[in-house]
Amino acid sequence: MAEELYITLEREASDSFVEKKSEFIGYARPCKTEEEALAFIAKIRKKHADAKHNVYAYCIKENNIMRFSDDGEPQGTAGMPVLDIIRKTGFTDACIVVTRYFGGILLGTGGLVRAYSHAAKLAAEAAHIITYERFTECEVICDYTDYDKIKAVYPSFGLKVDDTVFAQDVTQKLAVRSSEAESLVGTLTELTNGAVLIDVTGDRFDFLP
């Protein structure tokens, strides 16, 4: 059975907070490959070359790659908590880097785990976690009278209009949630008494805003 959901980050973003005078800056970015993740890590390390720690974790869907680094923090207190945020939240193809500027007060093992987890969570939320679903692509051809009827029911379905061409007839390229594709076809056919032409042209992962 084809996978129906794909959860990842929408954009690159960052957020920060201070804990006992230590500043934690979380950066998150969608990454399709390990090379993209490593390049992102290198960019943040260069930006914060004066920081004592640049902890990271990333998860790449292809080949099921998961990596993390404590970058000098006590083992298990930094990289793994960041990776756990990625895994528990359920998104993939993403990298998170957490930069720490030490403020002179030791946080202890538990404090470090909580701080790095919190920074990773803030970064992921800033980057906006989105769920891609499987969409069915189709071409819909109808006359102008039926177009008004058809357009009126679109809000009832999870769909996106990719293109509309007004010529002798109206031709639209749509993408509808695959779970609703059959219902959409039936509704449009009934509305137009079978006059509408609907051709399934493909499928893709996409998301609705």
Image (cartoon, rainbow, N blue to C red):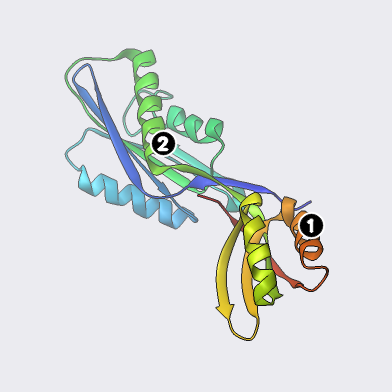
**Secondary structure beneath label 1:** helix
Residue 52 numbered mark, or none: none
Q: Position of residue 197 (x, y in %)?
A: 76, 74
Q: Nearer the viewer, residue 23 or 38?
A: 23
Q: Residue at x 50, y 30 (%)?
A: 84
- Is disc 2 surrounded by few (<14), some (14 to 19) or many (20+) residues within 10 Å? some
Residue 25 can be seen, yes or no: no
Q: Position of residue 152 (x, y in %)?
A: 63, 58
Q: Residue at x 37, y 37 (%)?
A: 123
Q: Nearer the viewer, residue 1 or 64?
A: 1
Residue type at the position of mark 2: Glu
- Is disc 1 surrounded by few (<14), some (14 to 19) or many (20+) residues within 10 Å? few
Q: Position of residue 71 (x, y in %)?
A: 33, 34
Q: Is residue 108 left or right of residue 20?
A: right
Q: How many marks?
A: 2
Quickly name the residue at label 2: 125
Q: Earlier in the sequence, mark 1 or mark 2?
A: 2
Up/down of 87 relative to 47, above or below: above
The residues tagged by marks 1 and 2 sit, at their Cα atoms, a distance apart of: 34 Å
Residue type at the position of mark 1: Glu
Q: Quadrant of residue 50?
A: top left
Q: Quadrant of residue 13?
A: top left
Q: Is residue 30 left or right of residue 207?
A: left
Residue 3 can be seen, yes or no: yes
Quickly name the residue at label 1: 182
Q: Is residue 36 left or right of residue 161?
A: left
Q: Residue furthest bottom?
A: 168
